[in-house]
Every structure is written in C-alpha cells, then in structure tokens.
Amino acid sequence: MKRRTFLQLSGMTAASALLAGCQSKNEKLIPCLIPPDEGITPGRATYYASSCTFCPAGCGIVVRVSEGRAKKIEGNPAHPVNRGKLCARGQAILQELYHPDRIGQPLKRTGSRGSGEFQKITWAEALGLLTVKLKELQRGRTTNSLAMLTPQLSGSMAALAGGFMRSFGSPHLLSYELLAPDWLRRATRTSFGQPGLPFYDLAETRYLLSFGADFVESHLSPVQYGNAFGRMRQERDTVRGHFTYVGGRLSLTAASADRWMPARPGSEGALALGMVRLILAEALHDNAALAAHGLKPEILLGRLKSHELPHVAGLTGLSKESIAEVAREFATTRPSLAMAGDGLAFQTNGQESVRAVQLLNLVAGNLNRPGGVYPAGASGGPDSSFGDLAALVRTMNAGGIAVALIKGDPRHAIPPATGFQGALDKVPFVVSFATLLDDTALQADLILPDHAVLESWGDVIPQSGSRQMVYGLIQPVVTPLHDTRQFGDLLLAAASELGGGVAAALPWKSSRELVRGTVRKRFASTRGGDFDTQWVELLRRGGQFDAGTKAATVYRWALAAAFPAPDLPAFAGDEMQFPLHLQVYASTAFHDGRGAPLPWLQQLPDPMSTVVWGSWVEINPATAAGLGISHGDLVEVTSSRSTLRLPAVIYPGIRPDLVAIPLGQGHKGAGRYAAGRGVNPLELLVLPEGSEQAWNATRVRVARISWKGDLVPAGHPQGSYRSDLVGI
Amino acid sequence: MKKTWFILVVVCSGAALCGALVLLYILPLDFREHSPVQPIAFSHAVHAGSNAIPCRYCHRSVDKSLLAGIPSVMECRACHLYIAPESPEIKKVMHYWETKEPVPWVRVNSLPDHVYFPHMMHVRAGIECSVCHGQVAGMERVSRTATLKMGWCLGCHRLHRASIDCWTCHI
C-alpha cells in the first residue's frame, strides 16, 4: 500500500468513527412481558427494614427496592444500635446478592476433593443424599458422629441449629468465629459471675482509656461505638472527652486518640494493674464503689506489691511519668471508662489482662454508672468455643465424625495450627451451605447453596450495642435470584424427612414460620391485639426496639473471684531466630475475611495504609531500615510454622519490635474477586502450649526478597502519618 | 521568516479547530428520528382516537411514578385474544408472547440522564398529556412534537409559576 493511500484510508476511518460517535440513535423502550406484581409501580422504590448479619453487632438496615431489585442499603434510623448509620461492610452486603459467582443450584463433588469438579444436581437429589447419610447414622446408632459448624448465630437460627443437633442426638455443635468475644464473656463470668457482654456508655464518658479495643473498626458494635465516640467528643458544649489508647499498633481507633501508649505486646494487663496500684496508693479510688463490691483497698494494695511503677514501666516499655499521669487522669476524671479489646485479649495472658482492666474500672468507680460500663441487654452467648473447637478436632482426628454440616468458611477462618483443616479432611462426608465456592465448599462433598441475607428470613439479637434488649428481624427484600434454599429451611426439611423425634422437636415448615413463632412467643403475651397486625408492624419497623430495660442487672464483683493476675506473656518461636512479634488484626473492610469476596470492599482503601486489593505487612521504619526494606518491597515473613510472601508497608505507627498483617485475604476460592488474592496470616500462627485464642502470640522474622511487591495503594499516605501521636 | 509562517499556521489551525468544536456544539446534531418506525404498527389513532380509550388505561403509573409506564405484552394480548386476532399486526404481538420476548418499542421522547423528570408531579398539577406529547389521539405513528430542550421546559415552568431553580430538575 502506498503511503498516500494509507493516510487517506486512516483519515476516512477516523472521520467516520467521529461521525458515528456523534450520531445519537433512538433508544429502545422495553416493556414487561408480564405485568409486575400488585404493589410494584415501575419507577417507584419500596423500602424494607431488615437487619445486617455481616458482623454480630446486628445493625438495623433499610433496603431500597425498585422493580423487585434491591438497589441500596442504609441504616435504619429507628434502630437503637446504629441510629440510621451503617458501615461500609453493611452497605456492601448488596453485592453478596448479586455476586456473579454465586452457586445457583446444589452441587455434588465428582472429582477428588479440592479439584473443584462438581456436578449440578436437583434439590430432590441433594436432599436425598443428605437424608440418606443422616438416616445411616440413625440406623447405626452413631448419631453422635454428626458435627455442625456455624458462625455465632443468635435468635431463632441459633435455637434451630441447637434443636436440630439435640434432637438428632449429637453434642458436636460448634459456633465458632475467629474474632468472637468469647474471652470477654469468660472474663466477665469469672469476675462478676454473669455471662454476657458489656455495654460501654461511651457517649457520656469524659475519659476513655482503650486497651487495644478498636471500637471504630471492629470491636463488638463498631457503628454504635463509632457514633458514640463522636458524641463523646463533640455533643457536649463544655466537655470534649479525652481518649488514650494503649496498644502496639496505631489502628484507626488509636489514630483518633489524644495519647498513644505503645505498650509491649502482652504487657497491657500489667499496665492496668500498675495503674490500679497507683490509684489505690494515692487514694484516688472510689471508696463507695470498692465497698459496694466487697473489696478493701488495703487488701488490694497488698496483692499489688509487685506492680510498683518502675517495674511496670520496665515491663511495658513506657515511661513512668506517662503511666502515672494517665492513671491519675483516669481516676480523677469522672466518669471515666476503660475498654479491653482484641489487642490484649489475643495473648496467652489475655484472659487475666482483660480482668485487670475490669478491676481498673471497678477501682475508679466506673461500673453501673452513666459514662461507665453496664451489662449489655443481650445476655449469654458461647464463651468457650475455642475449647469446643479443640475438642471437635480431637474427635475428628479419632474418626469420630462421619458427617459434617458446615455453614461459613472455617477452612479459611480457623488457624491451621489448631489442626482443624487436617482433621476435616478425615471426615468422610462434608456438606457445605455456602453461597460461593469458598475454601470450605471447594473441599466439600455436597454443596447446598444458601440464600443471600437479603433473600432470607431470620432474626438477630444485637450483641453489646445497647443496654436494652433489642430484637431485630431479617426479612427477604427480593425474590430469590437463584435456585437456592435457606440454611434454616434445609435443616427443617431434613428434620421432617428424618421423622420421629427430630421432626417432633422441629415442627415448623419454614424459617419464616419459625421466626413468626419466636415473635409470637416473645411479644404476643406482652401486648394485646391481633397477632397478624403486630407481625406486619414489627416487619415494617425491622424488629422490636423498645422491649424495655431489662430487670436492673448490674455488675458486682464475685466474692469467689480470684484476683486478676496476668502472667508474663508466652510467645511461640525462639527470640533469637524470630525477633519480631506478629499481630494479626481485623481488616476494616473484610472483618475476619467474610467481606473479601465483595469487590466494593476490596476496593475500599485501608484507612491507615490506603492499600486496596491485597495484603501487606506493616513494619516500623527503624526496623525496616535495619533489614534494608523499603516501602512496597516484597518481603518474606517466616514463623516456626510457615512462610508467607507479601509487600511491605513502612508504617511509623507500629512498635519497632512488632509487625502486623491484616486478616481476611488469601482465599483459595470464594469467587473471582477473592480467590488467590493476598495471603492469609493465620497460616503463620503458632499457638503456645495451653493457650486459647492467642492469635497474637507468634514470633516471626522478616527478610527482603525483591523490590517487586505489587503493592496497590490508593494514595500517598506518608503525609498523613505526620501525627503528634507517632514518636517512638 | 519560516518561523512566522509556522506560528501563523498553528494559530490558524487552532482557531479552525475551536470554530469546528463551537459549530459542533451549536448545530442541531440530533439525528434521532422524530417518528421512528415501530416493531409493530401500533396506532394511537385507533386506540386513543376512534376507540377513545383514556391514556391512563394503558399508561397506568403516570400519576404514581416518574415513568408513565407502558403496558406489558400480556396486557396487549388479553384484549386482542378477542379483538381482531387475525390481523397481521396482532399476529406479531402474539408471536412476541409465544416466544416470551418483550416488544422492542423505539423510544420517541427521551430526556438525558441528568434531567429529573417525574411524570406524576406534572399530571397531578393538572398538565394535560397533550401539552408535551401533542395530539397523540390523532397520530397513526407517534411522533415527537416538542423540542424537549431546557428552554422549552423553562418556558412552561415560568408560565405556570413552577420552580425554575437548577436543583428542581438537575438533582
């Protein structure tokens, strides 16, 4: 072709493309084939109240639905826990509904386990497979070899799972979550003789002292406490509450503090006791409170002899002056409030450290007071699920489990150091109720896909977000998109197939009927009138929010309670070989990993490092300089158990002897957005002998591999690190 | 000397480009058809004209929703099972129903995405359909009668003392 022809031709192509682009065409106007259902007007949105189940906080949501499609989720303004606010995770559950990789119908494994080869089957066939297995167990009188694993459910679904297992005759029901506040329930039971979680009256307090409780991101009820924190700072005309944060890593919560005390990992309990001793020694304590709890300052002081200020300063690596100052401020500012969180709980001495913080609250007179700590409205909940997990692993290893029914993704969310993954491989028949082919479903023999939350019936009792008993309802806002069935409905279907005692114990036909029954039992007696009207009204509002303050429960120090005595923390790994502590923390976007399949959350920049779509390890600049690591380098983190490769983030807001990796990534499955992305730091964890939930007790070493870390930050955060708080 | 020429040429071509762009903006480059051919020769003149079916019998959500709404294929069929089932155009409707496909009508009146136009507010304010849509009852094939440009909207808003704040329509 001649040069001239080529130019002419390309010119003509460009011109015609330009013209075609300008030319606007008439659009199409596509009508419905069948008129929409009664009550649906095209172009007019309907709003449904429901509840968020992403985390156990149980916030109320309002979903906008247009033409039968869920479009947007906001907080329910009438809900006492979140007061119309909602976090990014709650907004993103819309994407669970529309996820392109959702399992649309039951699947049966055809290839070897983990090969990902499945065959689509009908529901009749799938339920047949399940009931045949269950009937085999019944016939062989080995009903106790059925195991069920669920997240920590509340309300009717917890009762249903419990009722199913009890009537079937198996004790192996495990409600397990990695970040479950079992430690807090257990500590509260030991100290005050009652289970249940605390409600912190953050909004009314004047001095907040958080021991590793990241209440803005993930602790207990983040929307409630984030909102209350704002009110503590700005709602009162003359008072701006003071906030001190204790913990080795500057989290988003810590970055909002007035003072940051980066105590050595595992020393926070000793710090709390040191403060108690100083308050008592200087007679700044609340005498009336001590008397009310049956404690005597002299006796306490005698117990605290070893927690002299210089000793505590040595343990924590903080200055004597700052510890004394904070202790005095805490005791003299009323009301004040101390919170204990994941940061100190996930150590080998976590349990006792949490109790030390409870004692600190007691001594300063913060229990059962406005601006202090109350027992939360919702009582109960599992407090030893880690022990149950260990027991289940032993049973599975001994071949005592023949069928495992699994809701959730424990293969990803349980540290392999517990031996769970290997033990599950020995279970001959694994059933998963996943919505996506997650790590657990990939290794399952039968997959019975669950509805998305927005297609389900249920109820939720929010934990810790309110002093009152709150009851939230979950209702379907759209017709199910796929041929899926709700977990609860499947249990009920299986129960009716099994017949006998199981069917008699679970007489409901569907989850809807079950929830309706719960509501009838709970509320019909308290108010007169027609139940159907009440039911519709409760669904309209999203639950029962003014159930009244529960009979005045207060905290009272149990007389038999031992004095909190946190030992020195134990760490797994030799100090010479593995010089750094590892902290794993709940990711702002994914919590413990359940949010990773949703692209909105993958795209949500981490508030401190601005990283998106991946994992990273946070290293102090001084430590990094010593190891020759710069921002974005690929590094290798090694513990005595495993090795991971991931990019480094140079972060001044972390102790030099600490590195931190966020939880949530490193899925093998769970859809196209999560699979194979980032790393799962749980693989590194080693649990010291005899410890429970000690996720932060592992030592690691870090080495530089190359400059190619493929870190994707959404901004250049170095500027925002210039904070008065950072000055180690 | 060469340099001056070069600068002159650059300036001229720049001005020409700007002129072309301005022209592109001013010229009525709306190539959309005012009266497009529809997949079925549906006659408003027959339905709304000779048979005097009220507009809202089919465009049902006009006083409830942003959209006036167009009847579903099932509703067309419901009447035409009995009325003129043998006509070739009706057979097309039945074919759509049998293949379970909606009729791909071609849009005649359309507003850009940055305009918020709620039908219900206008209908409730007592504006007749024909003010914007013309005498549809006399049209064999519907054609656009209004320009649907902002000046045209504002003229009517001023006349009826409706709000002419930007945020009224551009929300």
Image (cartoon, rainbow, N blue to C red):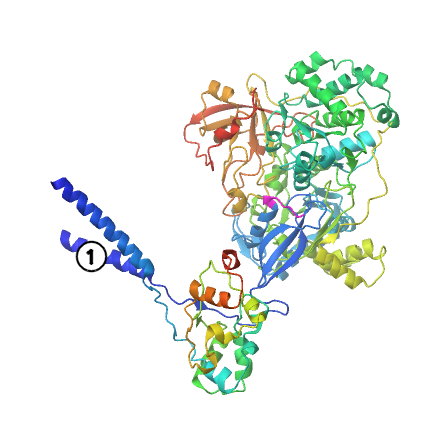
Give the total number of marks visible in the rendering.
1
Return the residue at label 1.
Answer: A9
Q: Can residue B90 be seen in this view?
A: no
Image side of residue A613 versus residue B34, left or right: right
- Residue at 78% from the left image edge and 32% from the top image edge: A188
Circle 1 sits in a helix, a strand or a loop, which is it?
helix
Closer to the camera in the image, A637 or A562: A562
Please name the amino acid that badge 1 sits on: Leu
Q: What stretch is highlighted in magenta?
A: A84-89
- Classified by dominant secondary structure, the portion drawn in magenta counts as loop
Whether A421 is drawn above or below A565: the answer is below
Q: Which residue is most to the top?
A: A310
- Residue at 54% from the left image edge and 38% from the top image edge: A665
Closer to the camera in the image, A20 or A703: A20
Whether A289 is drawn above or below B142: the answer is above
**Rendered-image quadrant of the N terminus of chain A:** bottom left
Q: Quadrant of residue A364?
A: top right
